[in-house]
C-alpha cells in the first residue's frame, strides 16, 4: 500500500513539473515584450511600497528574456505584476 502511495506522489510531481515546463516553452520573445510593456506602464504610475521590488523583478525579467530564457523571464515579469497588483 505504501508503494502505491509513493507512486501516486511521484506521478503528481511529474505532472506538475510537466505543466511548468510547458508554460516555460510557451513563453516567447513576443510574450516577453508584451509583459515588459505592461510592467513598464504600471511602474510609471506606481508609487507603492512594492515599487522597488517590482522594478527589480522587471529587470530580472528583461535580462532573462534578452538571453533567450523566456520562461524564466516571464516568471519574473509575473512576479512584478503580482507586486504591482496587475494581471
Image (tube, helix red, strand yellow):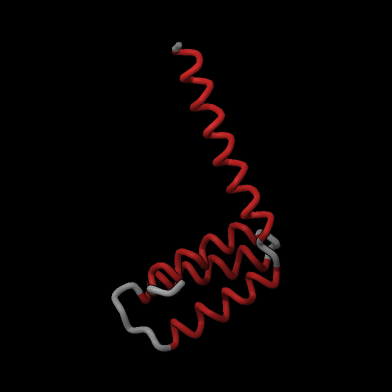
Q: Position of residue 39 (x, y in %)?
A: 50, 77
Give residue 31's position: percent from left, percent from top. Answer: 65, 70
In this rendering, position of residue 43 left or right of residue 20: left
| Residue 6, above or below 60 | above
Query: Against 28, is 16 above or below?
Result: above
Residue at 40% in and 88% down: 45
Number of marks in picture:
0
The reply, left or right, for residue 42 in relation to residue 34 is: left
Q: In which quadrant of the rendered view does residue 48 lie?
A: bottom left
Residue furthest toward the left?
49
In the image, 62 versus 41, the foreground residue is: 41
Position of 19 with respect to 48 (left or right) is right
Q: Position of residue 42 (x, y in %)?
A: 45, 82
Residue at (56% x, 66% y) in the render: 61
Please state which of residues 86 and 39 is positioned toward the viewer in this rendering.
86
Which of 38/1 is in front?
Answer: 1
In the image, farthest residue toward the top: 1
Where residue 58 sits in the image (x, y, percent)? 50, 71
Q: Which residue is at 29% across, 75% downward?
A: 49
Which residue: 33% across, 72% down?
Answer: 50
Q: Quadrant of residue 82?
A: bottom left
Q: Is residue 53 above or below residue 44?
A: above
In the image, residue 8 sits, relative to residue 64, either above or below, namely above
Quadrant of the image containing the N terminus: top left
Amino acid at each position: 500500500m505504501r508503494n502505491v502511495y509513493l507512486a501516486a506522489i511521484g506521478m503528481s510531481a511529474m505532472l506538475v513539473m510537466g505543466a511548468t515546463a510547458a508554460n516555460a516553452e510557451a513563453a516567447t520573445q513576443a510574450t516577453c515584450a508584451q509583459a515588459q510593456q505592461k510592467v513598464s506602464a504600471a511602474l510609471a504610475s506606481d508609487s507603492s511600497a512594492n515599487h522597488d521590488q517590482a522594478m527589480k523583478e522587471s529587470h530580472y525579467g528583461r535580462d532573462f528574456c534578452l538571453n533567450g530564457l523566456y520562461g524564466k523571464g516571464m516568471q519574473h515579469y509575473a512576479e512584478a505584476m503580482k507586486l504591482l497588483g496587475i494581471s
